Image (spheres, coloured by chain):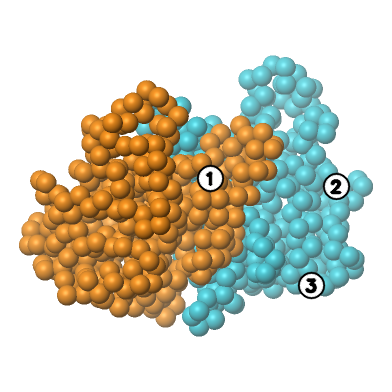
Chain colours: A orange, B cyan
Amino acid sequence: MACPPPQGIGMDSCVIPLRHGGLSLVQTTDFFYPLVDDPYMQGKIACANVLSDLYAMGVKTCDNMLMLLGVSNEMSDKERDTVVPFIINGFKDLAEEAGTMVQGGQTVLNPWLTIGGVATTVCPPNEFIEPGNAVVGDVLVLTKPLGTQVAVNAHQWLDEPERWNRIRLVVSEEDVERAYQEAMFLMSRLNRTAAKLMHKYNAHGATDITGFGLLGHAKNLVQHQKNEVSFTIHNLPVIAKMAAVAKACGNMFQLLQGYSAETSGGLLICLPREQAASFCKDIEGEDKLQSWIIGIVEKGNRKARIIDKPRVIEVTPKIA
Amino acid sequence: MACPPPQGIGMDSCVIPLRHGGLSLVQTTDFFYPLVDDPYMQGKIACANVLSDLYAMGVKTCDNMLMLLGVSNEMSDKERDTVVPFIINGFKDLAEEAGTMVQGGQTVLNPWLTIGGVATTVCPPNEFIEPGNAVVGDVLVLTKPLGTQVAVNAHQWLDEPERWNRIRLVVSEEDVERAYQEAMFLMSRLNRTAAKLMHKYNAHGATDITGFGLLGHAKNLVQHQKNEVSFTIHNLPVIAKMAAVAKACGNMFQLLQGYSAETSGGLLICLPREQAASFCKDIEGEDKLQSWIIGIVEKGNRKARIIDKPRVIEVTPKIA
C-alpha cells in the first residue's frame, strides 16, 4: 500500500503523528486471494505479508492485528467448514509467532475467497526507520530469494499438460514440487528479525518485495531517497531452477528483469557497506535463513537498475 | 465487529492497552457491498458506518482511516472510471467531515464491488466510554430512526412489479422515494455529536445499530453490563411508512420485532434518566436531528426485549 504525499515518510506503512507525546501511528493493510493449495499455509502467508509492511519500516512490534476474511459463497458448507478454520488458524498462529494477536476484524461472504489484515503499531520515532536515508557507498541486501510466483505457477502447471510441456525440458516435477514447498516456506517467514537488525546495523531504509517485483520496489525506494543516489543490482538470488523456468516462459514472468511479482517477499535494505556482512550473518544465526548483498548505492538521479548480465544465485533449500 | 473475550472492554471497537503512558489503541473495521444507487452517497455511507463503531465507544476523534476497496472486474472500463471516483470521493469527504483523513488502504479487483475501511484512534482512557456501566433507572436513547433496510428494499421493488404489488396498498411510490432519500441521508450522517455528548451527559455505555437490528444489538449491549440489569424497549421510531411496509411483508424484515438490519444506524445509549432530555435536545440543536428515549434499564438478568405493543413513532423528514 502507498500513502499520499502529505505524509511522505511512510512508504510501506502509513506513519501518522499522534496527539500524544511524540508517538506515531504506523499501520498497513493488505488483502488478496489464495495462491497455494494448503489453507493453513495460506493463512500464515497472508499474515506474514501484512506484517512485512511494518517490518520494512524497521518496526518489530505489532500492537494489534485485524483479520479481514471474505468467505466464498460458492463453497459448500462442508468445504467452508473444512477450509476456513485452517486459514484462520494459520493467520492467528503466525500473528502469535510475531508476538501480536488478532483482536478484531470482519468476515463477509464474497464470490472469491479473500484473506488479509490490518497491522497497527503505536511507537516513538526511534522504533521506526524512515526509508529515505541511503548514501553513496551503501549496499543493498535482500532477505529472501526471488521466484515465488514462478514456483506457484509452475506447480499449478503440473496438472496442465499444455503448459507443463513448455517448461518440462528445463525442470523436473520433483524440482517444481521442491520449489513450491520452498516458496510456501519462504512466503510464510516473518521479516521480523531483519526489522530488528535494521536498528542494530544502522539501516538507511528498506522496502518489502511484493507485487511489483524486485526492480519495481527498488525503483519506488530509490525515488524516496533524500540524497541523489541510484541503485545498481548485480546479483539475483532465485529459488533453485526457477530462473530456468522463467526463461523458458519468455516474457511471461520477467523474473530476471526484476518484475516478477512476489508474495510476502524479502526486505530490500540499504545498509552501510561495513555492516552488511554482519547483518546477513546475524539473520542466518537467528533464523537459519540466508540473505544476500545484491547491489550497491551509487551517485545518481534516483533510478534503480539491474545490470545487463546479473549473476543468478540458485538458492537450494538446505533441507530438501 | 466483535472482540474476543480476553479484551472484553471493547464491543464495537477493539480497545488494546498500549505500551505508552496509559494510552489505548481503539480500532474497528467494516466493509460491505453497495446498497444504494448513488455511488457518492455509497462512499459516504460506508465511511459513516465504519466510524460509527468508534462513536459507539464515545470516541469522537479518529486518528486515521484506511480505505478498503474492491473494484468489480465485471464492470466495463467506462463504468469503473465513472463509478469508482464517486465512491472514493464520498468516502473521503465524509472522513474529512469527521475531522480525519484517509491515509492508506488497498484496492483489489473482485467480482463484487466492496467498500469499507479501518478507523483507528489512540487515546487516553478518558476519551472512550466502556459500554458496561448501565444502572437501574437509566433510559435508552436512540439517535436515528429504524427502517433503512426496509426503505432500500422497497425502493428496489419500484422496478419489480410482482414485489411492488405486495406493498402498494400500504404505500405510494412517492412515500417510498421519500423514505429512500431519508434513509440515504440518515445512513450518511455521522454519530459524532452523539459520541461527544455521551461524555457531557455521563453515558453509561452505547452500541451502534447495524446488521443485527435494534434488538439484536440491544441484547449484545445488555450482556456486556456489569450490573444485573435488563433493557425494556417501548418506542420504535421508524422512517415514515416503513412500519406499514414491513408489516405488509409478513416475517420478511422483522422490523417491529427489532431484527431488521440497519446500515450505519443510530447509537443506542444508556443515559442517566435526568440527562436524557438534555442530550436529545443538544443533538437536535447541533445536528438538526431528532433522538428518542425508547426504553428503560430495569433490574434483571441481562436480557433485552421490546414490549408487546410498542409505540411506533412515524418519523417524517422535516424537509421533504
For badge 3, the amino acid type reads Lys
Question: Which is more toward the observer, A112 or A274?
Answer: A274
Q: Which residue is mark 3?
A: B226
For badge 2, the amino acid type reads Arg
Label 1 SS: loop
User: Which is more foreground, mark 1 or mark 2?
Assistant: 1
Label 2 SS: strand
Label 3 SS: loop
Q: Which residue is mark 2?
A: B311
Mark 3 and mark 1: span between their CA atoms?
Answer: 43 Å
Q: Quadrant of residue A7?
A: bottom left
Percent x, y of residue A12: 34, 58
Q: Which residue is mark 1?
A: A38
Q: Taking the image as drawn, is residue B58 in sight?
A: yes
Q: Compare marks 3 and 2 and give the one earlier in the sequence.
A: 3
Question: Which is more toward the observer, A243 or B141?
Answer: A243
Q: Residue at x 69, y 73 (%)?
A: B202
Q: Residue at x 63, y 49 (%)?
A: A85
Q: Residue at x 50, y 48 (%)?
A: A42
Q: Chain of mark 1?
A: A
Question: Which is more toward the observer, A223 or B248?
Answer: A223
For badge 1, the amino acid type reads Asp
